[in-house]
Amino acid sequence: MLKWTIIFLVVAIIAGVLGFGGIAAGAAGIAKILFFVFIVLFVISLIFGRSRL
């Protein structure tokens, strides 16, 4: 999941540098969504990982 976030972040940065506003906004939006999903899954895994101890 983190791999996809990094890929979309790099695509958004490259598109932003080249000036393709629509592509940059789309890729950045996907990167944000994947980032927050990854953070939520990480927190959930921490909580359930600690409850098993």
Image (spheres, rainbow, N blue to C red):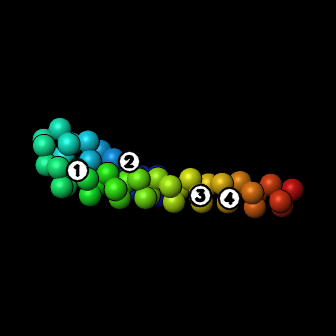
Coordinates of residue 50 in the picture (x, y in percent): 80, 54
Please, what is the three-letter code of the amino acid marked with disc 3? Val
Task: Identify the residue at the far right of this view.
Answer: 53
Q: CA distance from mark 1 to mark 4?
A: 31 Å
Front: mark 1 or 4: 1
Say which residue appears at 50% left-offset and 55% top-offset. Answer: 36
Query: What residue does disc 4 label?
Result: 45
Q: Which mark is residue 6?
A: 2
Q: Is disc 2 surrounded by few (<14), some (14 to 19) or many (20+) residues within 10 Å? A: some
- Relative to 10, say whether 44 is above or below: below
Work out which quarter of the rendered image holds the C terminus and state it: bottom right
- Local secondary structure at mark 4: helix
Please, what is the three-letter code of the amino acid marked with disc 2? Ile
Query: What residue does disc 3 label?
Result: 40
Q: Which mark is residue 49?
A: none
Q: Nearer the viewer, residue 19 or 48?
A: 19
